[in-house]
Amino acid sequence: LHHLNLLIRHHLNLLMLHHLNQLMLHHLNLLIRHHLNLLMLHHLNLLMLHHLNLLIRHHLNLLMLHHLNQLMPHHLNQLMLHHLNLLMLHHLNLLMLHHLNLL
C-alpha cells in the first residue's frame, strides 16, 4: 500500500506538472502576442503620424503657393510650381520606397 501510494502521488505530480507546463506555455503565448500587438500598434502610429505630417506640409505648401500667387508675377509663379512639383515627386518617391521596404 505504501508503494502504491507513492506511485499514485508520483503520477499525480507528473500530471500536475504537465498541466502547469501547458498553462505556462499558454500564458507565454498570450504575452508574446500582446507585445507583438503593442509593437505593431507603435509602428502603425508612427506611420500615421508620418502621413499626417506629410499631409499638413502638403496643405501648407498649397496655401503658401496660393498666397505667393497673389504677390508674384506669372513667370516666377511657374518657377515655384516647377520646384514644388519636383519636391512633391521626391517625397512621393521616398514614401513609395518606404512602403516597399515595409512590404
Image: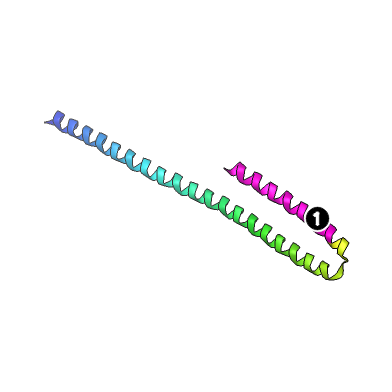
Q: Residue at x 87, y 67 (%)?
A: 72
Could you say which quadrant of the image residue 88 lies in? bottom right
Q: Is residue 44 left or right of residue 80?
A: left
> Does the magenta stretch mainly form a helix, a strand or a loop?
helix
Q: Is residue 11 left or right of residue 72?
A: left
Could you say which quadrant of the image residue 102 lies in? top right
Quadrant in the picture for the N terminus: top left
What x and y, as percent, mark residue 48? 60, 56
**Disc 1 packing (10 Å; few <14; some 14–19; many ≥20):** few
Q: Is residue 62 magenta?
A: no
Q: Nearer the viewer, residue 66 or 16?
A: 66
Q: Residue at x 51, y 51 (%)?
A: 38
Q: Nearer the viewer, residue 34 or 5?
A: 34
Where disc 1 sits, the SS reads: helix
Q: Which residue is mark 1?
A: 82
Which range of residues does the magenta coloring cover?
Answer: 78-103
Q: Is residue 92 magenta?
A: yes
What x and y, as percent, mark residue 79? 85, 57
Residue type, label 1: His
Identify whether 12 is placed above or below 83: above
Identify whether 74 is placed above or below 82: below
What x and y, as percent, mark residue 23? 33, 43
Q: Nearer the viewer, residue 50 or 12?
A: 50
The residue sitting at the top extreme is: 3
Identify whether 44 is placed above or below 9: below
